[in-house]
Image (cartoon, rainbow, N blue to C red):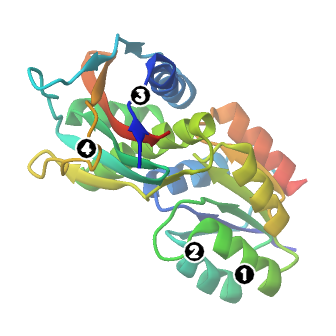
Amino acid sequence: MKARLLIVDDSMVIRNLIARQMLDERLPPIDLVDLAGDGEQALAIALSRKPDFITMDLTMPNMDGEACIERLAEVLPGARIMVVSALSDKATALRAISKGAHGFLHKPFSEEQLVAALLELMS
Amino acid sequence: MNYRALNHEDIEVFSEAISAFFLNMTHEPAVVRTAYLLDGSASPLWGDFNGVIDVSGGFRGSITFSAPHGMLSQVLMAIGEREHSVDRCLDVVGEIANMMSGRARRHFGEELAISPPAARPRTVPPAAARATGVPFAIPLRWRAHEANLVVHLDIRR
């Protein structure tokens, strides 16, 4: 079965960084990586491509990450979502998890922290 | 409504945030120098690109990361980005400002509402913040490049 990843972030630089990291041999192989720049795009892509794993920024234009996680939990309940955000306060992390996120990685992150978080997401 | 200016402890949070960004993302520490007040006699030297976060909630003002093209190109290279175009520089300068604001929110609490980053070239200088207190500039050096984090915030008492 092919594993699919959706990377959601309004920064192309961060989207590319996470996508490149997926080539790391410590991570399980991913067959398809999709990219979205905001929550609305993410929902549309998620509905058509049905990703298994999603990394989700929170502060984005159009639809923010929290609203997107809430919708994804309804329409794609099997997807595992990890928040990757600069919002590093505890209340934000707990709220994201209560809405359906499975993990939280704070920006700025090191390569090692990103790999560890992705491994946990995909375990 | 009463607002207070930033104090020493607040400023320290931003200095730590800059250090954390360069150390984590590029594996090379930045030299973060002492913050100073932009009290009218001094004005920030806006770099080639400015990433601006507007804040609201119990706060008013903005957080701006301002850097030269050369620094941002090398940051992009350090994090593995092959393209160093103007668009990528605008993207990364906004993202750095976003990370500074996120760290500030951990310090000030979730009442600090932050906007998505707005990134602008030097030809479009940042608009004046809605804050009335005196802004701080935190200068830093990374590799051979100088940049500034300009924090202009009022905090509701």
User: In front of the other: label 1 or label 3?
Assistant: 3
- Asked which secondary structure carries label 2, the reply is helix
- Observer-nearest residue: A104 or A31? A104
Q: Which three-letter amino acid code belongs to the residue tagged 3?
A: Leu
User: Label 1, label 2: how many angstroms apart (C-alpha)?
Assistant: 10 Å
Check whether the beta carbons of the residues at disc 4 and disc 2 lie within 8 A of each other: no
Check whether the beta carbons of the residues at disc 1 and disc 2 lie within 8 A of each other: yes
Q: Which of the numbered marks, if any, corresponds to residue A39?
A: 2
Label 4: chain letter = B
Q: In the drawing, does residue B130 fall left or right of residue A61?
A: left
Q: Which of the numbered marks, if any, corresponds to residue B139?
A: none
Which comes before the other along the chain, label 1 or label 2? Answer: 2
Crowd class of label 2 (few under 14; some 14 to 19; many from 20; radius 10 Å): many
Residue that numbered label 3 is attached to = B6
Q: Which three-letter amino acid code belongs to the residue tagged 1?
A: Arg
- Observer-nearest residue: B112 or A78? B112
